[in-house]
Image (tube, helix red, strand yellow):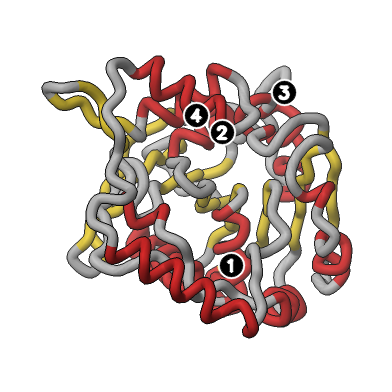
Amino acid sequence: MRNLKTPRPESISLSINGKTITGIRHRVADEDAPTKALCLHGWLDNANSFLPMMSLLPEIDLVAIDLPGHGFSDHLDSVYTVPDSAYWAAAVIKAIGWEQCHLIGHSLGGIIAPLVAVGAPEMVESLTLIESSGALTSEADEFVGRLQKSMQDQLEDGKYESRVYESKDDAVNTRLRSAKMALSSARLIIDRQLTEFEDGWRWRFDPKLRVSTAHRLTEAHVREVNQHIACPVLTIVAKDGFLTSREQTASRMELIKDHRSVLLAGHHHLHMDTPEPVAAAINQFLGTTPALGG
């Protein structure tokens, strides 16, 4: 019989290695749902990016976290790397008290999720990768140039400190100029990404997130990871997103043993702009019941 209790979102806070990781949990609080999923957002996004889909995934105990340096989570003392982010995701699963769960990752989150699936395979039941087929890469002969740029960024005091915005709307407009997404989606992201000061609004995210990365993975690294993913994988691709124009997308996906893909209308943040078809694809993949009318 279908569960008629209404799941509700709640704020969560986890203490991991002296750092606080925050997020949003959507569930029927007094019940143990058989299907559990951890959601990982994109670069400079936060847990709010999964809010539009939550009510459409009612049978899932769903936790969307703010990755370190994003949203309300603590900043790290070091620079941010993809393998380290995978560790934090695995540590979150352990801190919640789950032995195993599904991973749903958008963009950067979809880059991190496969590394968790390969690094701690016993923790991961499946992957849903929204607009992601693996990391942006660079090869060994690019390393010195990237190292020099990263060093310059870190040595230049205050290079990426937040500008001051007079209002939240100013910050929303800045976001809309850098990404194709609905106004309502941009507002959701901004609501969790700004702090108010006496002189205006500033970004909450860690400025170090914008430092040039010296140590990108190579294409060989990404392909090696994809070949070692043992769990089922669903890739959700936006018709007007990033993956359709990247030449590596098809060959990367072909390396995943148990893989299916769906192409949906929309841009890179389609899970926010048009959450219904994305949630429908996830419910079908996980075998969960959608919301009534969904």
Residue marked by disc 2: 178
User: Nearer the observer, disc 1 or disc 2?
Assistant: 2
* Position of 283 relative to 34 (above/below): above
Distance of label 1 from label 2 (alpha carbons): 33 Å
Distance of label 4 from label 1 (alpha carbons): 33 Å
Distance of label 3 from label 2 (alpha carbons): 31 Å
Distance of label 4 from label 2 (alpha carbons): 5 Å
Indicate the quadrant where residue 277 lies. Answer: top right
Of all residues, the one furthest to the left in this rendering is: 198
Label for residue 124?
1
In depth, the one of 152 and 22 nearer the eye is 152
The residue sitting at 30% across, 39% down in the picture is 162
Residue 3 in sight here: no
Instruction: Estimate the x, y position of residue 165 in percent, counting from the top left.
Output: 30, 23
Distance of label 4 from label 3 (alpha carbons): 30 Å
Distance of label 1 from label 3 (alpha carbons): 27 Å
Residue marked by disc 3: 294
In depth, the one of 32 and 136 nearer the eye is 136
Q: Are marks 4 and 3 in contact (CB under 8 Å)?
A: no
Q: Amino acid at mark 3?
A: Gly
Residue marked by disc 4: 175
- Secondary structure beneath label 3: loop
* Position of 271 relative to 166 (above/below): below
- Secondary structure beneath label 4: helix
Q: Amino acid at mark 2?
A: Ser
Q: For this view, does 257 lie left or right of residue 156?
A: right
